[in-house]
Image (cartoon, rainbow, N blue to C red):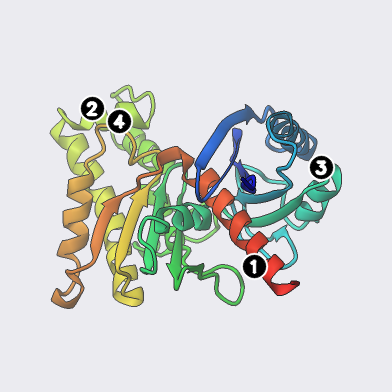
Amino acid sequence: MKRQKLFGALDLGGSFLKFAYGNTEKGIIYHDRIQIKEPDNNDFIFDAIKQAVNIINKHEQSVKTFGMGTPGTVDVDRGMITGITPNLPNIQNIAFKKEIEKNNNIKVYLENDANLMSYAEASLYPSQSVLGITIGTGIGSGFIYQNDIFRGQNYSAIELGHTIVNLGGRRCKCGKFGCVEAYSSANSMLAICREEFPNLEINNIAHLLKIGKENKEIKSKINLLNSYLAMTIANAVSTLDPQVVCIGGGVVEIKDFDFDFLKQKIKGFLASNYQCVKIVKAQFENRAGIYGGILIAESKYLEHNLLYK
């Protein structure tokens, strides 16, 4: 019996590099993560990638094709990150893909991390258009149309986190004012609630959501901030008319996050002809990025082999 081809995935974040291997048939066979001790030092990032590839090679020496997700705007043709990446400040405008391939003797397909999350979730809805949103430190999003990632002419399509919801509002890390990311991301919700409730000790986003279950003022503020996000998603639905909206990320995975409130708020902002859209919680949770990486690596490998047969 012919051995199945396996593919690798790398998912780069501000604190950890997640990595995995698998394929469409078997799913994720193995996954783990490595801490990035100094995210502003590219030597640590490249070293973490080398460690991950070496670990995978100890398991399966045949894994040579990888899909990799990173924050920021990703020029997939040149293999470079061109957008702002506040948590990884020095990865922009360098030959990122080439450096990884040269140092590790592998083939890498670089992609925006939210696009990979959306790509993974869309695999559960074959041939349907899927709008994916991830809520964490920031707010990422992607759109899968006709089984492919829609990137736009500048690789910057579907950046919902930087949709303006409040004119002249809070400054976003992107430099603009009033972006939904400045209100509805984990970091922003924490900052706003700490400012407005200075006498209340709030440890982290999970603690904030837990407090919101009992404290009416906090709950009201959280609901308002999530309403900005619901408005943004509803506007995107009105523009893209997707069949499925899939919402995930670290905040959504917290047990006290009120997904039903967000879902109903989105529906409330939609006209009657959009009410048929399916709004679901992400299924792959924190493995969506690595599974998306495996899927994109397999897809590109098959595409390349068919092209050069």
Give x and y (percent) for residue 72. Answer: 60, 55
For the N terminus, the image quarter is top right
Question: In the rendered image, which residue does mark 1 sit on?
Answer: 303
What amino acid type is highlighted by mark number 2?
A: Ile
Residue placed at 47% from the left, 40% from the top?
A: 287
The mark lying in front, picked from 3 and 4, is 3
Give x and y (percent) for residue 212. Answer: 21, 32
Question: In the rendered image, which residue does mark 2 sit on?
Answer: 211
Earlier sequence position, callout 1 versus callout 2: 2
What amino acid type is highlighted by mark number 3?
A: Asn
Secondary structure beneath label 3 = helix
Earlier sequence position, callout 4 versus callout 1: 4
* Callout 4–callout 1 Cβ contact below 8 Å: no
Real-space Cα distance between discs 4 and 1?
46 Å
Secondary structure beneath label 1 = helix
Residue 175 versus residue 72: which sits nearer the camera?
Answer: 72
The mark lying in front, picked from 2 and 3, is 3
Residue 163 versus residue 108: which sits nearer the camera?
Answer: 108
Earlier sequence position, callout 2 versus callout 3: 3
Question: In the rendered image, which residue does mark 3 sit on?
Answer: 104
What amino acid type is highlighted by mark number 4?
A: Leu
Count residues near mark 2 (Cα–Cα under 10 Å), then give few for <14, some for 14-19, many for 20+: some
Secondary structure beneath label 4 = helix
Q: In this view, does 167 lie above or below 194?
A: below
Secondary structure beneath label 2 = helix
* Callout 1–callout 2 Cβ contact below 8 Å: no
